[in-house]
Image (tube, helix red, strand yellow):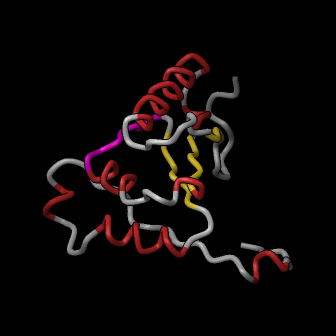
């Protein structure tokens, strides 16, 4: 990986939290308070990215709790719908609407959340519609 010489990168710290578990795994396999960890880093962050895969849209109970633990930091949150190239145009619109609806039940903001759509990887697009 080549990193350009940039002043911005001198003050940039990225923290990639562990993925969110679903079902029985979330109660058994975590050895720590995941929501507490999310809250801890949210308070110290300038930007929070919630990244969803277009082909695996699932907001589990643990993810709901994690998003709720971000309360008070809504202005820092940006939602990203990733891997959009894996679904067709019609399916992408359905997934986008479903994500907006699901987030609306968890994130209580006066306005609808903006969702950024893209495919952020170094492979060729699978569906270039």
Question: At which x and y percent is residue 54?
Answer: 50, 36
Name the image quarter holding the N terminus.
Answer: bottom right
Residue placed furthest toward the top: 90
Q: Residue at x 72, y 81 (%)?
A: 11
Q: Residue at x 44, y 38 (%)?
A: 103
Q: Residue 29 vs residue 10: left or right?
A: left
Dividing the picture into quadrants, the one containing residue 127 is top right
Viewer-closest of 120 and 125: 120
Q: Residue at x 59, y 54 (%)?
A: 75
Residue placed furthest toward the bottom: 10
Most frequent secondary structure within the magenta stretch: loop
Viewer-closest of 89 and 40: 40
- Judge whether 89 appears above or below 69 on screen: above
- Judge whether 119 appears above or below 89 on screen: below
Count of picture labels: 0
Question: At which x and y percent is residue 52?
Answer: 48, 44
Question: At which x and y percent is residue 104?
Answer: 44, 34
Name the image quarter holding the C terminus.
Answer: top right
Which stretch appears magenta? 55-61
Question: Is residue 57 on the magenta stretch?
Answer: yes
Question: At which x and y percent is residue 44?
Answer: 53, 75
Question: Is residue 42 on the magenta stretch?
Answer: no
Q: Residue at x 61, y 63 (%)?
A: 47
């Amino acid at each position: 990986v080549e990193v350009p010489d940039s002043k911005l990168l001198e003050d940039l710290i990225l923290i990639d939290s562990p993925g969110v578990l679903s079902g029985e795994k979330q109660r058994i396999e975590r050895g720590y308070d995941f929501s507490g960890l999310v809250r801890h880093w949210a308070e110290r962050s300038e930007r929070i990215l919630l990244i969803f895969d277009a082909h695996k849209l699932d907001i589990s109970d643990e993810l709901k709790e994690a998003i709720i633990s971000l309360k008070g930091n809504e202005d820092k949150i940006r939602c990203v719908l990733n891997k959009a190239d894996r679904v067709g145009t019609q399916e992408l619109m359905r997934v986008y609407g479903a994500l907006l609806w699901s987030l609306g039940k968890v994130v209580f903001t006066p306005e609808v959340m903006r969702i950024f759509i893209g495919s952020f990887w170094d492979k060729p697009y699978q569906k270039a519609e």
